[in-house]
Amino acid sequence: MPAVVIVHTLAGYRAQNEGWQADALQHAGFATLTYDSFAARNMGDLVATPMQGPPPYASALADAFAALSALARDPRIDPRRIAILGFSFGGEVAHDAAFERLRATLAGGELRFAAHVAYYRRGCTAWSPPQTRIPARRF
């Protein structure tokens, strides 16, 4: 089956944001994988408590590709039909995961996301890779 990796906002995983999207996608026949990059690093809501420091952006990208790899190894999932969807901070992750240099470094081999959906990208990072995006593929 196809799958979608869902990446959270600066507030971390929230049922009312990423959770409802996962429910809707599952109802439509997709497997979903959601995670909380911040909680895994003992960080909380970076919107409510910004003094924790900058968001762990590089780690969030690595987490997204780790999620892709985990789903691709699951025999129930078609590894050619795994998308990434993100909100705000997660939208930046979903967007930047489309750059070939990052994909080649973090995923290796031929593994790649089949689609990238960025809801209200907020420009959480100042990094803009100079290389071209991965060509679109039919999902």
Image: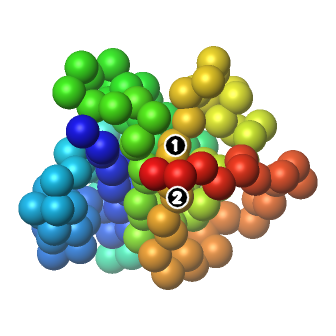
The kind of secondary structure element at disc 2 is strand
* CB contact under 8 Å: marks 1 and 2: yes
In the picture, which quadrant includes the N terminus?
top left
Q: Which residue is mark 1?
A: 113
Q: Residues within 10 Å of mark 2 (few under 14, many from 20)?
A: many
The image's mark for residue 89 is none
Residue 115 visible (yes or no) = yes
In the picture of the structure, the residue carrying the numbered disc 2 is: 116
Residue positioned 67% across, 64% down in the render: 125
Q: For the residues marked 1 and 2, what is the alpha-carbon distance in whole angstroms?
A: 7 Å
On screen, residue 98 above or below 101:
below
**Residue for point 46% across, 51% down:** 139
Identified at 56% across, 36% down, the residue is: 112
Residue 71 drawn above or below residue 3: above
Q: Depth check: 131 or 27 in front? A: 27
Total marks placed: 2
**Residue situated furthest right in the rendering:** 130
Is residue 118 positioned above or below 96 on the image?
A: below
Left or right: 29, with 37 as reference point: left
Of residues 39 and 81, the one drawn nearer to the viewer in this rendering: 81
Amino acid carrying mark 1 in the image:
Phe
Q: Is residue 51 visible?
A: no
- The image position of residue 121, as x and y in percent, is 55, 75
Under circle 1, the secondary element is loop
Q: Quadrant of residue 104?
A: top right
Near mark 1 (Cα within 10 A), the count class, few <14, some 14-19 or many ≥20, is many
* Residue in front for this viewpoint, 53 or 114: 114
Q: Residue at x 20, y 27 (%)?
A: 76
Q: Amino acid at mark 2?
A: His
